[in-house]
Image: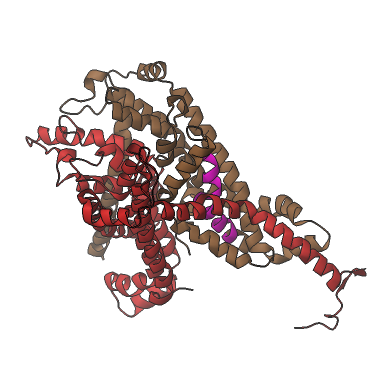
Amino acid sequence: MLGPNTGQPTIGGRRTSKGRRKLLNREEKWYGYAFVMPMLLGYFFFLFGPIVASFAMSFTNWNLLDELKFIGLDNYRNAFFGDPVLLDTLSNTLYFTILFVPLNIMLTLGLALLMQASIPGMGFFRTAAFAPVVTSIVVWAIIWKYIFQTDNGLINAVLKTFGVTGPAWLYSMELAIPVVVVVSLLKSLGINMAIFLAALKDVPMMYYEAARIDGASRWRAFWHVTLPLISPSMFLVTMITIIGSMKVFGQIYIMTGGGPGTSTYVMVYYIYEQAFKYYEFGYGTAIAFILFVIILLLTLVQWYGRKRWIHFEQ
Amino acid sequence: MNSKLRILTLGRLLHYAVLSVVAFISLIPIYWMAITSVKDFSQVFVTPPQWIPNPFKWVNYVELFERYPYHLYFFNSLYIAVLVTAGTCIVASMAGYAIAKLSFPLKNGIFLLLLSSMMIPNESTAIPLFVWFGNLGVVDTHFPLIVPAILGAGGTFGVFLMRQFFLTIPNELGEAARIDGCSPLRLYWNIMLPLATPAIATLSILTFLGSWNEFFDPLIYLHSSELYTIPLALAMFTDEGGVKGHLMMAASMVATVPILTVFFVAQRHFIEGISMSGVK
């Protein structure tokens, strides 16, 4: 509603009309730029600049030995048609993701449903499920490497007391990735669980009451009330988790070093090896740029998917 | 009535059973690390596994610090994490405040630009940055672990988190002060920042944790062992192979206990921060 003196606001008789406001605004503008400037410079120097440079470098043969040359699409051609290790790497990364993401979503959602109840001792259980999240991935992977050791590792030692000879977990082509998946799952359950817990808390109680009055079982209430209402979080968590699994590195570096053979080579491990062990910067950037494109596409799906696919967003 | 009650109790018991299994699996590796760190070397790998060390050898920790300069790695990790955390909080809260509360042209564009950096993975920019930092002569220093961590993707998340928080503070609060001639800088420093303490706490904890546990960047940038951070030192020792299990676990404890302590003290902020990253 407009007051009678909207045109001429005066405060305590002082002249604070448009002129002063304009002055304040001009001042505010410069402060605004100054405040975002460090982040903006950081963006250009450490994110945008390097990603453009990465694109440019991927068309060269940049390494420590040869003369720097522009080689066009050779790195990409080599990557997709001449390098069996990269194909292994891509399929391993995909395999890891396909195992890791659905298990992660189901387990964390299930856990969140269990932990949502306010029953005595819940604080302890939440804290326990969270402890691995704060532990360094390096420490976590080292512990599990010991636990999964073939001779006298904790698991095989326990199996031996039951008279079973455990397999060589980390030295088996078939088992290495599933073992790393299990270790990664246990490390990160708490993260998605927390996001789901927050989402579940936002579901209004009255919907459950309405469902109960209508005679819906708890199972049906879950499928028809809870799940649709938390679908935005579900979608977001799925995308974040997929992106995270494309970048899996620490546990691979520590637990398997890509082996046995190339059976646990994943994208970041391959980038690391090409660029920082063999100093093949040109080829390394080509693979790093492929990773960027994959993550860019996933992020775009996430952003546009949220708008199109989800009906319940406030 | 009685049978219904029984079903209820049974359900509750099952509930606790499942949660206990999860807690057990989550804590057993940490327990195992803790006990192995005080075991005699001869008892690290025995069948059946020894669940309570006998004897307790606290002296393993003395041995660890005598053999390896772990105090140095600890100090490196600590000062890097403190600098990164302080820097991120200042820079991100300033930008977050400006984007939420000040009006200037291109503001939304700048915010979107910053947000878009979340889709640029650290690993994809690592090679050009490495070459560039090599030319600047700062490879094998702590510079690449500190400055890009503050002004790069980590800071961007901070900007987002702080903006969300500042949006919840009513505009009238700042406007009154502005009309009275308070500059945006003073307003930010004296009014907005103190109000933002909960958000700053959340951001600090997440940033500290991220920096303390960071592995990829130290791995590519640090070559001299006296510059190592704890995760890098641990990784290098597993590579060498010669380090014995109990010392390895003692070193892992040194890396883990401080961060677990921080976590137990500030759980609420931590879990809030994680779930914040899932909101919008």
Outermost left residue: A163
Q: In terms of depth relative to the viewer, which is nearer, A19 or A141?
A: A19
Residue A245, can we see it? yes
Q: Which residues are magenta?
A: B144-164
Q: From the viewer's perspective, is residue B231 above or below residue A75?
A: above
The colouring scheme, among rainbow, by chain, secondary structure or one colour, is by chain
Q: Quadrant of residue B31?
A: top left
Residue drawn at point x = 26 percent, y = 66 percent:
B1
What secondary structure is the stretch in magenta mostly built from?
helix
Q: Is residue B30 magenta?
A: no
Q: Is residue B159 magenta?
A: yes
Residue drawn at point x = 35 percent, y = 19 percent:
B60
Residue drawn at point x = 47 percent, y = 28 percent:
B227
Label tally:
0
Find residue B110 and report its horizontal and vertical position in percent.
59, 63
Chain A shown in which color? red
Q: In terms of depth relative to the viewer, which is nearer, B186 or B269?
A: B186
Residue B121, can we see it? no
Q: Is residue A42 left or right of residue A213?
A: right
Chain B shown in which color? brown
Position of the N terminus of chain A by quadrant: bottom right
Find residue B244 and report its horizontal and vertical position in percent.
28, 22
Find residue B44 and report its horizontal and vertical position in percent.
24, 24
Q: Quadrant of residue B111?
A: bottom right
